Image (cartoon, rainbow, N blue to C red):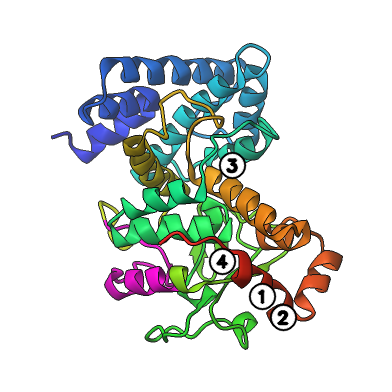
Amino acid sequence: MSSEPDRSSAIEDDPVAYFLEDVRFQGKSERTHDAYERVLREFEAYLDERGLDVRTANHRDCMAWIHRLRSSVGESTVATYASYLHRFYDYMSQVGAFEDNPMTLVLEEIDESINTDPQRRDVSVPAMRSFVATIGHPLDRAVVLTLLKTGMRAGELCNLDVRDVHLDVAIDGAPHRAQLEGRPNSVYVDDSPEQGQSYNGERRTASNKRKRATTIPIDPELSTVLEQWLAIRPDPQSDADPLFLSTSDEWGCRLTPDMVHHRVESHARRRGWYRSGGGPEENVTPHYFRHFFTTHLRDRTGDRGVVKYLRGDVAQDVIDTYTHDWGDRVREVYRDHIYKLL
């Protein structure tokens, strides 16, 4: 096993080669290894032309490269290349080689802007119900159902702390935040968390991209699944008391968007809903769940305003309209029309 100085030297000399070696150690195929190498070396050459380096590149540098790719390759290929770069930075930040992952923000931007209205896979509510039934792990089940029932982004889910949830069943030692007072069975999604900034005493790895903070109702199905997760949830490593924690190598640490993506991807692959190299038109990802939520709830309610409010996509004047009598307006519309998945 390499010593710590040897490891640091290898990372400093060639961080891409260090990552690629670990890709091989993880048992990835030679084809996968070569694909990572080709994309990462192209990105490295792009930065070198501009006097930049992969160790210090920020999200604007990454986005500029993505923008240049659009002139030469298709949208699904751009998304694939971006996912490779994202996994490189996420891995290097998790092992402590890099300070953060500049691709976290970029990848979410791509999800919403690379193709503003892709023709996505058409998954019915019964088909999604069958998919959810195959997920047995309490964490995965809680993550997937929260995304499907609230329409929040993966980064927003990762930023949730226990104080942001108000359930009928009290959570030991964790009072809910003041914004949830009088709003039982609901979750508060703030607009404040930013990647790299401290929020509730913890430096965050993802940004919440809402135009305004949003209070989203929790139906009995989601409430039950969250209670089951909280009953077995590990002790958190952070004093911020994250709601969703890793139960694998990063035991007790806050989930990251990349962890969420991999968990969803693993279940979607088994279902035949995810293919390496596939674009948003066919792959079911955490962002697909936001699309599913929007499409099915809008069709059921016929009320675009309520759906936009729940997604956090509306300005203050519209939010005032829907929050003036929050219990009677948003909660009742949501309760009467949210689809059943259990």
Secondary structure that dominates the magenta span: loop
In space, the residues marked 4 and 3 are separated at their CA atoms by 20 Å
Of residues 102 and 81, which is closer to you in this image?
A: 81
Crowding near the residue tagged with mark 4, few <14, some 14–19, many ≥20 C-alpha atoms within 10 Å: some
Taking the spot 13% from the left edge, 35% from the top edge, the residue there is: 1
In terms of secondary structure, where does tag 3 sit?
Answer: helix
Q: Quadrant of the C terminus?
A: bottom left
Res 96 visible: no
Decide: is 31 above or below 205: above
Amino acid type of the residue tagged 2 in the rendering: Asp
Residue hosting label 1: 332
Amino acid type of the residue tagged 4 in the rendering: Tyr
Residue 180 location (% of width, % of height): 60, 81
Q: Which residues are magenta?
A: 223-247
Taking the spot 58% from the left edge, 56% from the top edge, the residue there is: 151
In terms of secondary structure, where does tag 1 sit?
Answer: helix
**Residue 108 numbered tag:** 3
Of residues 260 and 191, which is closer to you in this image?
A: 260
Decide: is 101 above or below 70: below
Residue hosting label 4: 199
Residue hosting label 2: 328
Q: Earlier in the sequence, mark 3 or mark 2?
A: 3
